[in-house]
Amino acid sequence: MKAVVQSRAGDPTEVLDVADVEAPPPPGPGQVTIAVTRFPVHPGDLQTIAATRPDGGHPAAVGAEATGVITAAGPGVDLPVGTRVAAFFVGGAWRQQITVGADVVVAVPDALTEDVAAQMLINPITVLMLRRAAQQHHSVGFDGVILNNGAASSVGRLFTAGAQHHQIATISIVRSAARADELSRRFPDVPVVSTHTADWKDQVRAAVAGRPIAVALDPIGGTASADLLTLLDPGGSLVLYGLMAPEQIPLHASTLVHRDLTIRGLTIGRWALSSAEQKKSDLASAAAISQGLASHFDVAAIYPIDRIRDAAAHAARSGKTGTILVDATSGATP
């Protein structure tokens, strides 16, 4: 069978390969084997690949999320063979078959397409984590406003849609007029500001109409984070959940000290440290989000597994709408 692997750290478009590997072992107690149909390529995947140094130069398995069909189930598993499922936090998910613990698997609702099923865990769980972090500020959900930077991204759009559902006020921040127009059409009741205009900060202040800017969510870092900090009201929080900017955040301690601001980091990797109860709740919530907000799970393109480098290059490209998916069944071996 085919699997995506990497032999060294570096640019995913240069270090990712597709190798013929042995099929996974049969499932043991509490495990299932899944015939993978699709998997997503997230920006976070690319960052992990770029930083990963495989042990001893041996090719390392790649990927953390996939969807497919259960082909075998071990003792103690309630999900029957033939069930469509999504799996997350799977080391080496980018392959045609995986054997994993049933505790990281969720049944895919019948109404969901393969495209949505392939995205139904990592991004929705990230949104749940962001909302929990934002709601630690006492004003969120009341008169406090959240700045949603990178709002045109897959996570950004889902966060906006979920915030609307929970009646949490947000302002979308993007980098171009085209992205602003796109979001205005999708979310006509949510203010959107593009940083390509010189007075974008004044536009943000006008949009909040005197309400406190309590939290800023930022997947970028660097100067973008510094700009967001200047907009926060005293006692506000910047939540960083990405590393897209190459530069450090230009920040003087006085910015935090004199206005009682906080900065916290958040990554989907931290979810692994959650309690079993929290994980179970989040997995169920992710499935519910994927059903209720299915129209916001856009797909930018679908690539065959043999073109994984092209998929990685597209995933790294700015200006796309939606997630890059890979069809794991292309060239499938028996």
Image: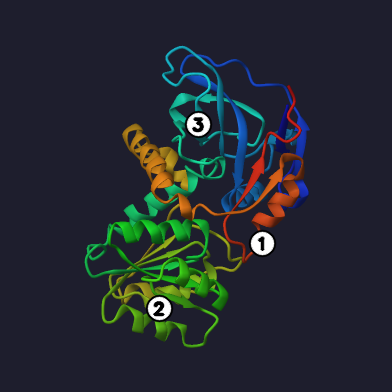
Q: Which residue is mark 1?
A: 317
Instruction: Please name the residue shown 73% across and 31% down the image.
Output: 2
First along the sequence among labels 1 and 2: 2
Q: Are marks 2 and 3 in contact (CB under 8 Å)?
A: no
Q: CA gap, disc 3 to disc 1?
A: 29 Å
Q: Is residue 254 visible?
A: no
> What kind of residue is marked 1?
Arg
Q: Is residue 8 above or below residue 177?
A: above
> What kind of residue is marked 3?
Val
Q: Position of residue 110 (x, y in %)?
A: 46, 34
Q: Which residue is mark 3?
A: 85
Instruction: Please name the residue shown 51% across and 40% down the image.
Output: 117
Q: Which residue is mark 2?
A: 230
Density class for disc 3 (Cα within 10 Å; few <14, some 14-19, many ≥20) is: many
Q: Is residue 42 left or right of residue 130?
A: right
* Residue at the far top in the pictured view: 75
Mark 2, mark 3: which one is toward the viewer?
Answer: 3
Q: Position of residue 190 (x, y in %)?
A: 38, 70
Q: Position of residue 200 (x, y in %)?
A: 46, 83
Q: Is residue 194 left or right of residue 16?
A: left
Mark 3, mark 1: which one is toward the viewer?
Answer: 3
> What kind of residue is marked 2?
Thr
* Residue at the far front in the pictured view: 111
Instruction: Please name the residue shown 50% across and 74% down the image.
Output: 180
**Which of the two residues, 195 or 152, is positioned nearer the viewer here?**
152
Q: CA gap, disc 2 to disc 3?
A: 44 Å
